[in-house]
Image: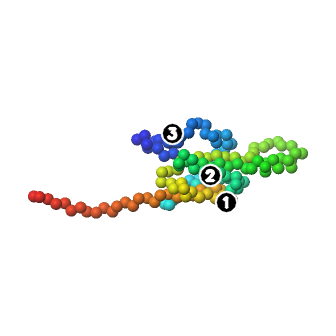
Amino acid sequence: MADLFFGGPFRRLLYGRHFPPDWASASATAAMDWVETPTSHVLRINVPGLGKDDVKVQVEDGNVLTVRGAAPPAAAEKEREREKEVVWHVAERGRPEFAREVALPAEARVEQIRASVDNGVLTVVVPKEPAPVRPRPRPIAVSSKL
């Protein structure tokens, strides 16, 4: 019964690394969609304004997918240099920065993960192990000594 409540995604809360994780200083978590198809898990994460060099995707602890992203500091510095004579009234957008951890299911093939960035969306495809083929039921002849 405990596996029902504490298995799957909740096991990271109880048995994971100590809080706060090293990425806790990131300013936000990115919005994510996670879709499971018959052959893979597909994660789509919003990364507006970030390119492939600004996003880091890696697998830690065997099955934890970690995604981090931050705009290069040089771009923000150049923008501020151009605007030295400008008076800022509100600066809420800041430097886009995020971190996200996802515990992958046991059937994930972590050595075959693919990731790509297109139009501000990071797509991570995690192939799955094929489901074991269930043997078809077959009748068994019953004998009697009566």
Name the foreground residue: 90 vs 67.
67
Is label 3 in a helix, a strand or a loop? Answer: helix
Tell me, yes or no, whether the two marked residues, 2 and 3, touch with CB atoms within 8 Å: no
Quadrant of the frame with the C terminus: bottom left
Q: Which residue is mark 2?
A: 57
At 52% from the left and 42% from the top, the residue drawn is 12
At 58% from the left and 54% from the top, the residue drawn is 43
At 50% from the left and 61% from the top, the residue drawn is 39
Question: What crowding class fits label 3: few (fewer than 14 Cα within 10 Å), some (14-19), or many (20 or more)?
Answer: few
- Residue most extreme to the left: 146
Tell me, yes or no, whether the two marked residues, 1 and 2, touch with CB atoms within 8 Å: no
**Comparing marks 1 and 2, which lies closer to the viewer?**
2
Question: What crowding class fits label 2: few (fewer than 14 Cα within 10 Å), some (14-19), or many (20 or more)?
Answer: many
Q: Is residue 83 above or below residue 126?
A: above
Residue 3 visible in the picture: yes
Is label 2 in a helix, a strand or a loop? Answer: strand
Q: CA distance from mark 2 to mark 3?
A: 22 Å
Question: What amino acid type should be assigned to the residue bearing mark 2?
Answer: Val
Point out residue 98 in the picture as x, y percentages from the top left corner: 66, 46
Point out residue 105 in the picture as x, y percentages from the top left corner: 50, 51
- Give the side of residue 75 with respect to residue 97, left or right: right
Q: Which residue is mark 1?
A: 118
- Residue most extreme to the top: 19
Q: Which mark is residue 101?
A: none
Q: Which mark is residue 15?
A: 3
Is label 1 in a helix, a strand or a loop? Answer: strand
Question: What amino acid type should be assigned to the residue bearing mark 1?
Answer: Asp
Question: What amino acid type should be assigned to the residue bearing mark 3?
Answer: Tyr
Mark closest to the chain's N terminus, 1 or 2? 2
